[in-house]
Image (cartoon, helix red, strand yellow):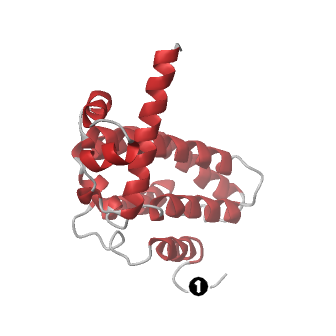
Amino acid sequence: MDGFQKRSELKKDKIKQTTIELLKKYPPKKVSIRDIASAADVSMVTIYNYFKNKDGLLLEIIRDLVEDQLDNSKSIIYGEESFLEKVQKLMNEKSNVLSAFHEEFITYVMKEEEIKHYLENVHIKESSVLIEEFIQMGVEQGYIDSAIPTSLIKSVIELYRRDLQSDDGILANYHDFHQLNNHLINIIIFGISGKK
């Protein structure tokens, strides 16, 4: 990579980081290319040249987040902790990533067609294999009842994902996303009785 390419990549990274910081404070609809350019100290033309438009920029940010999350999930799943510790870490990681953003971020990106398409056709396929392996670990270690089909467990996870994408999703509108994930962990592992 020559000097020009390095400077170009650094500028792109700065634009993405600046956008992430703005999306933590403001709803995506309120963050404009002009706001991003001003905060990143670049021209609007530079942003359009790198990302085409705001949706292109958001898609690239989502791709980066998803790739990081998949890498982190793999290191947790294949780590040395107990199955329950892994479940806790996986759920906390997801909630920490999402709760860092403004509360409208999740519903906004889930409605963007290109992002939705990417998540459904790339992320879901890659994570599906990982989920199956993780469920199998839970069965082998006695945490998941072997009588419950893997397909049913995956369907429950899919219901959660679809709810987040829905216009009238229940979970996406929950007031405290981090607390929601903690409750979901308990329901998934211990059921609604709460017996441990």
Which residue is situated farthest in the top direction here?
Answer: 2
Q: Above or below — where is 56 with respect to 1?
A: below
Q: Above or below — where is 150 with respect to 179?
A: above
Query: Which is nearer the eye, 41 or 63?
Result: 41
Q: Position of residue 71 (x, y in %)?
A: 59, 42
Given the image, on which type of amino acid does mark 1 rest? Answer: Gly
Q: Above or below — where is 157 with respect to 113?
A: below
Residue holding disc 1: 194
Please state the total of marks drawn on the protein image. 1
Q: Quick check: 143 left or right of 131? A: right
Q: Quick check: 116 left or right of 174? A: left
Query: Which is nearer the eye, 11 or 96?
Result: 11
Q: Position of residue 163 (x, y in %)?
A: 32, 64
SS label for mark 1: loop
Measuring 26% from the left and 37% from the top, which residue is drawn there?
Answer: 44
| Residue 162: quarter of image | bottom left
Measuring 58% from the left and 64% from the top, which residue is drawn there?
Answer: 92
Q: Above or below — where is 42 with respect to 141?
A: above
Q: Position of residue 169 (x, y in %)?
A: 28, 69
| Residue 144: quarter of image | bottom right
